[in-house]
Image (spheres, rainbow, N blue to C red):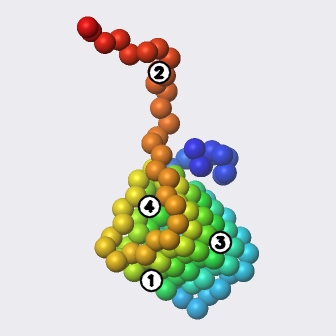
Amino acid sequence: MLRKDIFGGSSQVDHADRLNKIVAGTEINGDLTSDSNIHLEGEVNGNVSCAGRVIIGSSGKINGNLVCVHAEIEGAMEGQLMVENLLVLRSTARIKGDIQTMKLHIEEGAFFEGACVMRAGVSTAKLDTEPAFDE
């Protein structure tokens, strides 16, 4: 869903050789959009949109919203998170904001303040009729 809606394609973009690395000490003021994976050890003051995996390292921080396919957070995040598939909060993660994801893994020690909505994948099954019970 995310790749088609935001990035206009449907190709799988989870290649280790296509990695944007933002090192510690780097500060980005403004929105960041990528069709490749992102490893963030610096700070982003703005929204981040990624068609792949986002890793926020232990020194990384986002002050804004995050939209991506997969995310692994060791650092800090203040804003809304919308993760299409798996969100992993490591023990050092510090999150302030609402989460929407399909799968969630939280390690002991992680801090999360906000609401979380877990949604299942898109289903084509319909329940138009009442279930029949044998009497």
**Label number found at residue 64:** 3
- Secondary structure of residue under mark 4: strand
Q: Which residue is mark 1?
A: 58
- The mark that comes first in sequence, 3 or 1, is 1
Q: Which residue is mark 2?
A: 127
What amino acid is labelled 2 in the image? Leu
- The mark that comes first in sequence, 3 or 2, is 3
Mark 2 residue crowding within 10 angstroms, few (<14) / some (14–19) / many (20+): few
For the C terminus, the image quarter is top left
Judge whether residue 27 can be spotted in this image. yes
Q: CA distance from mark 2 to mark 4?
A: 30 Å
Tally of numbered discs: 4
Residue drawn where x is 59% and y is 60% of the image: 67
What amino acid is labelled 1 in the image? Ser
- Secondary structure of residue under mark 1: loop
**Label number found at residue 87:** 4
- The mark that comes first in sequence, 2 or 1, is 1
Mark 4 residue crowding within 10 angstroms, few (<14) / some (14–19) / many (20+): many
Of circles 2 and 1, the one toward us is 2
The quadrant holding residue 50 is bottom right
- Secondary structure of residue under mark 3: loop
Of circles 3 and 2, the one toward us is 2
Q: Circles 2 and 4: CB distance less than 8 Å?
A: no
Of circles 2 and 4, the one toward us is 2
Q: CA distance from mark 4 to mark 1?
A: 16 Å
- Secondary structure of residue under mark 2: loop
What amino acid is labelled 3 in the image? Gly
| Percent of width and height locating residue 2 | 59, 49
Residue drawn where x is 57% and y is 44% of the image: 1
